[in-house]
Image (cartoon, helix red, strand yellow):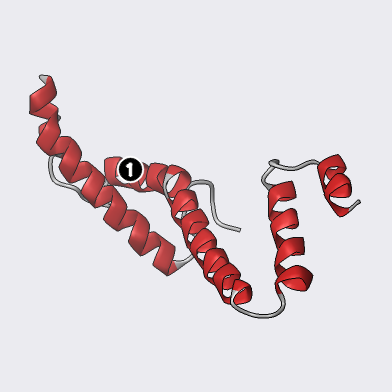
Amino acid sequence: MAEMGRPSTLGTMTAAIEFARRFHDAYEMMAPVFGYETREQTRHFDPESPNGKLMVAVIEKLVMPLVEEAKLSKTYLEHVIKILKSDQYEEIILPQIEEYLLRAGLMSEDDKEAADG
């Protein structure tokens, strides 16, 4: 298991570093607009510095789960579209939609039973 805030795969680490770099650059660019002067020693992003490691860890904790969720949602929707175009709609897609709604907390077991009723 990965350390808290530490990516578990190289691909995720690379993406987190890239997000952190972009966040850092935008932060540095926008700071003067808000009347804030950043510290000289952290003006250039270094993923190996304590500041860089912290920024990557925060991105890994907050942003990467959203990225992964979006990827899963896209994959799921592509699958749904494929099934909707097939003859297997009722036996495959309806149970999957119900399961998704249950897991997302958008449907209760009582709702599911009433729909199945």
Residue 81 percent across, percent down from the top left = 55, 70
Q: Residue furthest bottom?
A: 87
Q: Looking at the picture, does residue 36 appear above or below residue 100?
A: above
Instruction: From the viewer's perspective, tell me whether residue 12 is left or right of residue 51.
Output: right
Residue closer to the observer: 61 or 82: 82
State the residue lying farthest toward the right: 117
Res. 36 visible in picture: no
Residue depicted at x 77% and y 62%: 95
* Picture quadrant of residue 108: top right
Nearer the observer, 51 or 112: 112
Q: Nearer the viewer, residue 29 or 57?
A: 29
What type is the residue that disc 1 sits on?
Met
x then y, percent, for residue 60: 43, 49
Name the one closer to the observer, 101 or 14: 101
Q: Quadrant of residue 2?
A: bottom right
Task: Say left or right for 115 vs 9.
Answer: right
Badge 1 is on which residue? 55
Above or below residue 23? Residue 8 is below
Q: Is residue 55 above or below residue 90?
A: above
Crowding near pointer 1: few (<14 within 10 Å), some, many (20+)?
many
